[in-house]
Image (spheres, rainbow, N blue to C red):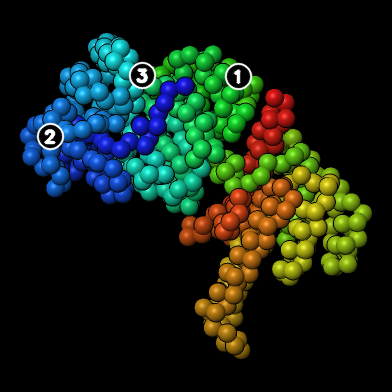
Amino acid sequence: MMDLDRLFYPRNIAFVGASENILKWGSYLFTNIIDGGYSGNLYPVSKSRETIYGRRAYPTLGEIEGEIDLVIVTTPASTVMDILAQCSSKGVRNMILITSGFSETGAEGVELEKRVSGFARENGIRIVGPNTMGIVNTQNSLFANGTHVRPGRGGISIIAQSGNVGNQMMEWAEQENIGLSKFVGSGNECVLKCEDYLEYFAEDEDTSVIVMYIEGVDDGRRFFEVAKKAAKKKPVIALKAGRTGTGGRAAASHTGALAGSYRIFEAAARQSGIIVAGSPMELLALASAFDSLPLPGGNRVGVVTLGGGWGVVTADECEERGLTLPELPEKIRDHLDSMLPAFWSRGNPVDLVGQPDVNVFRESIEIMMSSDAYDAIVFLGIVGSMKFIMRVYEAARRLGGNLDADVKSVKKRLDEVQNQILDRTIELMEKYDKPVYPVALILTDEDDIIHRKEDSRYSAIIYKSPEEAVLCLEKQYQYSRFLSSV
């Protein structure tokens, strides 16, 4: 395994091509590193400027005093061989080559990339790229990538053969308050391959879930061997692009990747323990589930719903994905009989027939969680219902209803009730080591989809639909089966 610590945790960075022209990559990345809060030494290298954003610029790498852990390059492809020679003389061992114009452009670019990789290997220089969007490490506030996104600190690490896809995923993660650990846009992979990052993240203590966007791999045997070893330690979730002929041709022109057969990839992924996602948003949803929830011990699901229709939809989703809904044990049925109207469903899904009593909902979930009959619980309707109640209250006030409390105090109380439900959900997951998947009745763009509780190893994720919740449950069960088989 390659030691990539000084790549992701550099003490000193030299930036070749740093610029104050805000339309250039040398400005995008340089300002991002500064603004992101990186606390190490940052040295701009420029032959035309004495300072860059107030920092002394150096004409060459050799004129920088002391050791350099990482060099970032944004200058044209024609300059790269000379920069590599300077790196060799300076003893630099890590480079992020943002520059494009290599194998993705045709025969001439392929030859140049071969020269770059050959020199780098001979001189022990590890290269990210070329044609990369850079790296991120939230653990040391290093944002050396082309977009100014600021996801929070967490356990998910991303390997992306498309920097655009990877950066968009980080943007979504920031919007939805999903914590990330590291990101690398692997680009053309002339030296460092996606397998190298996979090996590193598998051993990285700050990474709990590994996410991959893959367009193609050069050495399929090595990729799946590395992936299987990694999957035995932590979840590996992959989105394979280039599934169609058109997509495969697009991948070749994008990063020079050979897409290969999707069916072969999918079959090998299952054998290796890789969880396969169908879209970038699905990739992120799965990563968040694996990072936040315990794994189910089996495929038996208990469903609690405020209204019957969503229970039917959830039951269909579960059966189609190989999950079962066992009937209610007599003890649970008798207990619920004492709380619910005579016309309740008396089955699984447990239909609370629209009863708005939060205590009934909470007790129903608790008794289902405590039962050995179920490995996971999906509950629908109570989270988000506070917004529905709020709308009813506001309408009543507009119509002149005799209501004592003002709107703000009612909203505050309803938010407190929902937070108590989610706190209790986390406590139940801690107690029984089973996952719970809350599905919201109403969820707006302003809502955080992840609810955290201090000093808990788990978090509650609020799902937007039964389909999304059951998909995550299915994939977690799939991974649980893989772990039990190795």
Q: Earlier in the sequence, mark 2 or mark 3?
A: 2
Badge 2 marks a residue whose secondary structure is loop
Residue at the disc numbered 2: 58
Task: State the residue in front, 103 or 467.
Answer: 103
196 relative to 286, above or below:
above
Q: Which mark is residue 234?
A: none
Q: Nearer the viewer, mark 3 or mark 1?
A: 3
Residue at the disc numbered 1: 268
Q: Earlier in the sequence, mark 3 or mark 1?
A: 3
At 46% across and 44% down in the image, what residue appears? 180
68 relative to 139, above or below:
above
Locate residue 386, reporting x and y percent. 61, 68
Badge 1 marks a residue whose secondary structure is helix
Locate residue 205, reporting x and y percent. 51, 38
At 54% across and 13% down in the image, what residue appears? 221
Residue at the disc numbered 3: 191
Locate residue 21, reporting x and y percent. 15, 42
Q: Nearer the viewer, mark 2 or mark 1?
A: 2
Badge 3 marks a residue whose secondary structure is loop
Gap in angstroms between the C-alphas marked 3 and 1: 24 Å
Instruction: Please rate how many residues cluster around mark 2, counting C-alpha atoms within 10 Å: few if below 14, some from 14 to 19, many from 20.
Output: many
Gap in angstroms between the C-alphas marked 2 and 1: 49 Å
Pick out the residue farthest to the front.
66
Instruction: Please rate how many residues cluster around mark 3, counting C-alpha atoms within 10 Å: few if below 14, some from 14 to 19, many from 20.
Output: many
Q: Earlier in the sequence, mark 2 or mark 1?
A: 2
Task: Inspect this view and state whether residue 199 appears.
Answer: yes
Disc 2 marks a residue whose amino acid type is Tyr
At 51% across and 43% down in the image, what residue appears? 155
Disc 3 marks a residue whose amino acid type is Val
Disc 1 marks a residue whose amino acid type is Ala
Instruction: Please rate how many residues cluster around mark 1, counting C-alpha atoms within 10 Å: few if below 14, some from 14 to 19, many from 20.
Output: some
